[in-house]
Image (spheres, rainbow, N blue to C red):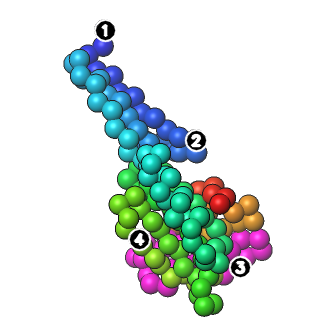
């Protein structure tokens, strides 16, 4: 029998090496389980908040990555664009972005410099793709309300 076993659980679409949704460890007879992403209850709360707002939403997404679980909504208000992230602890981050159109891709760049040169794009399928100067680093599929 093994003295140590480490198991990591990835959800569909998660990239190996970028964190796990949950893990189980066995160390010398003791088991440890931990959910690192969103629990079902947290996910339900975030989805309920998305469904209950009345904004002019361009897209909505759930991000269930390790340590950054959140709901995201891109919306337009008074002619300006915003990306709002809601987190399980009820905190909210809203960032104003500027839109540029490239064929069937809409690019959004933060109004305030984020210091990393990061921006995101929404394609015709509704996928949200995050880029840095090094290229694509995260893709989220649209969440339909």
Q: Are marks 4 and 2 in contact (CB under 8 Å)?
A: no
The magenta stretch spans which residues? 100-119
In terms of secondary structure, where does tag 4 sit? strand
Q: Position of residue 82 (x, y in %)?
A: 54, 79
In this rendering, the answer to whether 85 lies above or below 139 is: below
Kindly report the distance in space between the C-alpha atoms of the residues bearing marks 4 and 1: 47 Å
Residue ID for mark 3:
101
Q: Quadrant of the C terminus?
A: bottom right
Between residue 44 and residue 135, name the one nearer to us: 44
In terms of secondary structure, where does tag 3 sit? strand
Residue ID for mark 2:
12
Q: Position of residue 2 (x, y in %)?
A: 30, 13
Of badges 3 and 4, nearer the viewer stands 4
Q: Quadrant of the N terminus?
A: top left
In this rendering, the answer to whether 144 lies above or below 57 is: above
- Label whose residue precedes the other's in the sequence (3 or 1): 1
Kindly report the distance in space between the C-alpha atoms of the residues bearing marks 1 and 2: 31 Å
Determine whether, in the image, residue 87 is placed left or right of residue 100. Answer: left
- Label whose residue precedes the other's in the sequence (3 or 2): 2
Examine the rendering and report whether any part of residue 127 can be seen. Answer: no
- Label whose residue precedes the other's in the sequence (3 or 4): 4
Q: Which mark is residue 1?
A: 1
Kindly report the distance in space between the C-alpha atoms of the residues bearing marks 3 and 4: 27 Å
In this rendering, the answer to whether 98 lies above or below 30 is: below
Residue ID for mark 4:
92
Kindly report the distance in space between the C-alpha atoms of the residues bearing marks 3 and 1: 59 Å
């Amino acid at each position: 029998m093994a003295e140590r076993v480490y198991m990591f659980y990835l959800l569909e679409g998660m990239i190996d090496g970028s964190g796990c949704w949950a893990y189980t460890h066995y160390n010398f007879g003791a088991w440890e389980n931990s959910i690192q992403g969103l629990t079902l209850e947290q996910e339900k709360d975030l989805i309920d908040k998305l469904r209950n707002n009345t904004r002019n939403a361009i897209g909505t997404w759930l991000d269930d990555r390790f340590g950054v679980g959140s709901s995201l909504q891109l919306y337009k208000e008074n002619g300006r664009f915003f990306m709002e992230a809601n987190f399980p602890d009820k905190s909210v981050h809203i960032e104003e972005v500027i839109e540029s159109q490239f064929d069937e891709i809409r690019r959004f760049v933060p109004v305030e410099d984020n210091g990393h040169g990061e921006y995101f794009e929404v394609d015709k399928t509704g996928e949200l793709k995050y880029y840095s100067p090094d290229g694509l680093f995260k893709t989220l599929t649209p969440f339909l309300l």
